[in-house]
Image: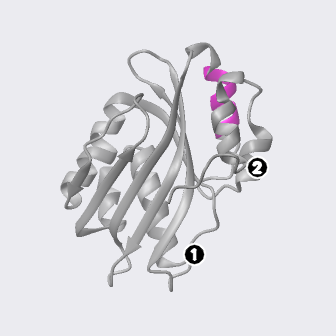
């Protein structure tokens, strides 16, 4: 695995496993984060600058609200000669307070600096569905059996439980949704 793929994987582990100490292995000290949230079911600050602020938003604050987090990059890992890398993502988690299930999807736009670490990250959240806690077992069983964190979208779609509320996610996985410009 190359340095860029390793940085992405390190970020995902830090966020999903509540390991803020891993973030310096993913992001440059002066990195920047932009959030494009296209749904009203979740919110984030629109921008963060510096590894401390990014770690606060993407790891510390995130795990205060959510648990059982699984994040997948729905693409092949980048090569180290790609300074810019876009991939589709899928996430599933449970809400600590309400026990509801959240399943979302969108795009990561990564830019790597000379240190091979992430210099800029734009996260576009296209969809964030909220499902009843009664779906916990089905959704977590699905997510926990997917290749992690690099998952072919076909595998994610094939294993998805037959829950009608997941139709937007299914469409995204099958490229039925519109690509952003």
> How far is the residue under mark 1 from the one under mark 2?
21 Å
Percent of width and height locating residue 24: 29, 65
Q: Residue at x 63, y 31 (%)?
A: 140
Residue marked by disc 1? 1
Percent of width and height locating residue 128: 50, 34
Q: Nearer the viewer, mark 1 or mark 2?
A: 2
Quarter-wise, where is residue 79 in the image?
bottom right
Q: Residue furthest right?
A: 158
Percent of width and height locating residue 80: 50, 82
Looking at the image, tell me whether mark 1 or mark 2 is earlier in sequence order.
Answer: 1
Residues 121 and 175: in front is 175
Main SS category, magenta section: helix
Q: Is mark 2 on a helix, strand or loop?
A: helix
User: Could you say which disc has been placed on residue 106 in the image?
Assistant: none
83 left or right of 156? left
Q: How crowded is mark 2: few (under 14 residues within 10 Å), some or many (20 or more)?
A: some
Mark 1 touches mark 2? (CB < 8 Å): no
Q: Residues within 10 Å of mark 1 (few under 14, many from 20)?
A: few
Q: Is residue 127 magenta?
A: no
Quarter-wise, where is residue 131 in the image?
top right
Q: What stretch is highlighted in magenta?
A: 136-143
Render colour scheme? one colour
> Disc count in the image?
2
Percent of width and height locating residue 56: 24, 46
Q: Residue at x 27, y 45 (%)?
A: 57
46 left or right of 155? left
Against 109, is 46 above or below? Answer: above
Q: Residue at x 27, y 51 (%)?
A: 55
Query: Which quarter of the figure is the N terminus placed in?
Result: bottom right
Residues 20 and 150: in front is 150
Residues 164 and 7: in front is 164
Residue marked by disc 2? 155
């Amino acid at each position: 695995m190359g340095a860029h793929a390793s940085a992405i994987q390190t970020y995902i582990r830090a966020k999903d496993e509540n390991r803020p100490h891993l973030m310096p292995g993913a992001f440059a000290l002066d990195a920047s984060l932009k959030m494009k949230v296209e749904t009203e079911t979740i919110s984030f600050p629109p921008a963060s600058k510096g590894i401390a602020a990014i770690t606060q938003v993407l790891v510390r604050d995130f795990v205060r609200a959510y648990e059982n987090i699984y994040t997948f990059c729905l693409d092949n890992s980048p090569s180290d000669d790609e300074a810019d890398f876009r991939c589709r993502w899928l996430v599933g988690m449970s809400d600590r307070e309400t026990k509801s299930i959240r399943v979302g999807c969108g795009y990561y736009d990564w830019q790597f600096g000379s240190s091979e670490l992430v210099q800029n990250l734009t996260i576009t959240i296209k969809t964030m569905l909220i499902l009843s806690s009664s779906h916990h077992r089905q959704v977590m069983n699905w997510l926990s059996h997917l290749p992690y964190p690099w998952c072919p979208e076909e595998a994610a779609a094939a294993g998805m439980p037959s829950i009608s509320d997941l139709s937007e996610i299914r469409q995204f996985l099958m490229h039925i949704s519109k690509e952003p410009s």
